[in-house]
Image (cartoon, rainbow, N blue to C red):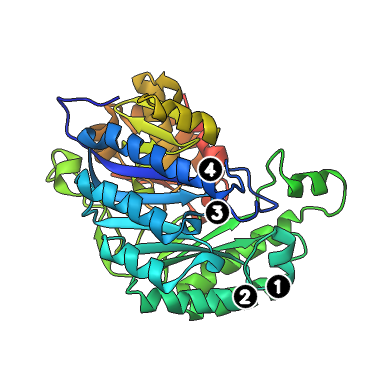
């Protein structure tokens, strides 16, 4: 996996699979585990970091889960000191996901002391009944307390996650949640419609007829989200993501090749650069159980089993379950599809520089189809989805995949 002749990979994702309680809607690989298993995972992760370190110079780092903030101070110190020893500190953007119930001032200060500069807090709702329905372990009061704790700990870049179209959620509740959440003044807001994944309790409840899905209400809630976020000073830059700050260039000149020939693409300053790298088809290492990586055209996936993951690394081996090398056209199709999730879509020159393919020739028919439904808009330099089209980004993505 490690290459000695190419520029090091600048993006790192680390999956922490542990939760105090698995939420009703969650289909990610996560588990409620005992301290012994968590400690074994921490040691295995440090070994995996050692394997990847020579090919990493992180500009963005993201610890997701699960609940990364569930790890205790000693476990965090072990991970962070390992990263320091391996020269993996100093990322421009370093995010840790947290649950409001597992945030402490000591953890916040420790994270900041090693260079973590962004926290993403899984709020989901500020209605006690809906938090219970989702299986969340935190209360609404914990949200406000934890937000203040993060500010006290020195964090000036905080994201809040919200969910809409939750069973039992009315428009009135949704408006109230958005008003309170946005009043906190976070620099970033992510908001997702509930998805009913197989093998989750919420999906089983839907199949059993305990509630129905109101698509019209979900659409109205999304439109209200976009409107309220704009009024609160956020700029939408992706279907579900909103950020504050003045426009800044999307990428460093070194990433774009002939930067002078390409149009300058701008995003709000507080946009999540790590996620933008995914949507622009960039490379990244994925470490931890079940984590996916994408390095120089090869997709990897680690074992979705914490014990098996640990066993492989304890033998000094990568914990990769499978790899897949994507043909250039398929790789370009995925890059096109993911990029259309962003409001700016794709400018033709940057896309061709990144993939070697021209959207205007390879995907002309697909662009015309989206335009015919008023889902897409084409001009001399760029193709992007319309506000209506963003609601159907999955449909657009299917068209562009090869």
Q: Is residue 92 left or right of residue 274?
A: left
Badge 4 crowding class, 10 Å Cα cut-off, few under 14, some 14 to 19, many 20 or more, is: some
Badge 2 crowding class, 10 Å Cα cut-off, few under 14, some 14 to 19, many 20 or more, is: some
Q: Is residue 290 left or right of residue 358?
A: right
Q: Are marks 1 and 2 in contact (CB under 8 Å)?
A: yes
64, 178: nearer the viewer: 64
Q: Is residue 306 visible?
A: yes
Mark toward the start of the polypeptide (3 vs 4): 4
Secondary structure under tag 2 reads helix
What's the residue at 67%, 50% (across, down)? 25
Real-space Cα separation, disc 1 to disc 2, in angstroms:
7 Å
Residue named by callout 4: 37
Residue named by callout 2: 140
Mark toward the start of the polypeptide (1 vs 2): 1
Badge 3 crowding class, 10 Å Cα cut-off, few under 14, some 14 to 19, many 20 or more, is: few
Q: Which mark is residue 128?
A: 1
Mark toward the start of the polypeptide (2 vs 4): 4
Residue named by callout 3: 388
Q: Residue 352 in the image: x percent, y percent? A: 26, 32
Badge 1 crowding class, 10 Å Cα cut-off, few under 14, some 14 to 19, many 20 or more, is: some
Real-space Cα separation, disc 1 to disc 4, in angstroms:
32 Å
Secondary structure under tag 1 reads helix
Q: Is residue 318 above or below residue 130?
A: above
């Amino acid at each position: 996996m490690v290459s000695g002749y190419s520029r090091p990979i600048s993006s790192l994702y680390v999956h922490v699979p542990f939760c105090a309680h698995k939420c009703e809607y969650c289909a990610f690989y996560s588990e409620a585990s005992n301290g012994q298993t968590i400690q074994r995972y921490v040691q295995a992760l440090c070994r995996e970091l050692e394997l990847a370190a020579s090919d990493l110079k992180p500009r963005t780092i993201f610890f997701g889960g699960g609940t990364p903030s569930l790890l205790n101070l000693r476990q965090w110190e072990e991970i962070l000191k390992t990263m320091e020893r391996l020269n993996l500190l100093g990322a421009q953007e370093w995010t840790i996901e947290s649950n409001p119930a597992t945030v402490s001032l000591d953890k916040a200060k420790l994270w900041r002391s090693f260079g973590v500069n962004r926290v993403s807090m899984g709020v989901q709702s500020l209605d006690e009944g809906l938090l219970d329905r989702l299986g969340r372990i935190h209360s609404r009061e914990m949200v406000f307390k934890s937000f203040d704790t993060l500010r006290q700990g020195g964090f000036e870049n905080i994201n809040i996650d919200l969910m809409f179209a939750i069973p039992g959620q009315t428009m009135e509740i949704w408006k109230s949640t958005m008003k309170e959440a946005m009043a906190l003044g976070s620099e970033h807001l992510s908001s997702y419609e509930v998805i009913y994944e197989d093998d989750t309790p919420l999906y089983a409840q839907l199949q059993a007829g305990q509630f129905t899905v109101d698509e019209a209400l979900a659409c109205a809630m999304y439109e209200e989200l976009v409107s309220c976020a704009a009024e609160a000073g956020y700029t939408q830059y992706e279907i579900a993501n909103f950020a504050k700050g003045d426009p800044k260039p999307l990428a460093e000149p070194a990433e774009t090749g002939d930067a002078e020939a390409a149009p300058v693409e701008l995003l709000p300053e507080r946009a999540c650069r790590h996620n933008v790298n995914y949507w622009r088809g960039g490379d990244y290492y994925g470490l931890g159980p079940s984590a996916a990586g994408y390095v120089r055209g090869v997709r990897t996936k680690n074992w979705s089993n914490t014990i098996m993951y640990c066993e492989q690394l304890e033998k000094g081996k990568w914990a990769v379950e499978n790899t897949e090398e994507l043909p250039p056209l398929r790789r370009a199709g995925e890059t096109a599809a993911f990029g259309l999730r962003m409001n700016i879509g794709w400018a033709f020159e940057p896309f061709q520089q990144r993939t070697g393919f021209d959207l205007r020739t390879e995907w002309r028919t697909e662009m015309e189809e989206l335009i015919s439904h008023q889902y897409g808009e084409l001009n001399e330099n760029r193709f992007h989805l319309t506000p209506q089209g963003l609601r159907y980004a999955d449909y657009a993505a299917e068209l562009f995949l090869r």
